[in-house]
Amino acid sequence: MKNVLKFLFIGLFFVSCQQKITPEDINKLNGYWEIEKVIFKDGDDKEFKMNENFDFFKIANNTGIRRKVRPQFDGTFLMNEDYEKVKVRFENDQVFLDYTTDYAKWTEELISISEDEMLIKNDQNKEYQYKKARPINLLGDGEKTK
């Protein structure tokens, strides 16, 4: 009986530690995100010290876009016309990001999100750890970055 109670307690502990994402949390998606680490389904991971591309999200009313952007030395970002349409879907205490382009459709699960960090899992069970990107200004000219 004691073992059953221990397992029950441990199980409840892990379930309670999992972040529940609310509709209000979706606004935290907006902005520039940099991949920090990819965790593969076998447990191996790959850390990224620096990225050439960031992900830019613009979501309102659970729909929006994601596009790849490149940070510049003056603190701005370059972007092209390509983007993916995104729909946020809440289902059974899970949050999914449904992407569409003219050529493909796919879904990723939003595992957790805060003001500065985000975790997304794709259909191959790869987890992408993101950190909120801040403008880089290597010029040191004292001007405000955009």
Image: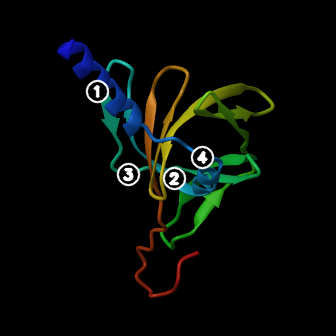
Question: Which of marks 2 and 1 precedes in the sequence?
Answer: 1
Question: Which of marks 2 and 4 precedes in the sequence?
Answer: 4
Residue at image position (52%, 49%) is 53
Question: Which of marks 3 and 1 precedes in the sequence?
Answer: 1
Name of the residue lying farthest toward the left = 2
Residue 112 percent location from the top left of the image: 48, 42
Q: Amino acid at mark 1?
A: Phe
Q: Amino acid at mark 4?
A: Thr
Residue at image position (69%, 33%) is 98
Residue marked by disc 1: 9
Residue 134 percent location from the top left of the image: 47, 65
In the structure shown, which secondary structural element does the residue marked by tag 1 occupy? helix
Q: Are marks 4 and 2 in contact (CB under 8 Å)?
A: no
Q: Amino acid at mark 2?
A: Trp
> How many C-alpha atoms fall within 10 Å of the one at disc 1: few (<14), some, or many (≥20)?
few
Residue at image position (41%, 73%) is 138
Residue marked by disc 4: 22
In the structure shown, which secondary structural element does the residue marked by tag 3 occupy? loop
Above or below, 140 against 133 in this view is below
Name of the residue lying farthest toward the top = 1
- Mark 1 or mark 2, which is nearer to you? 1
Question: Which of marks 1 and 4 precedes in the sequence?
Answer: 1
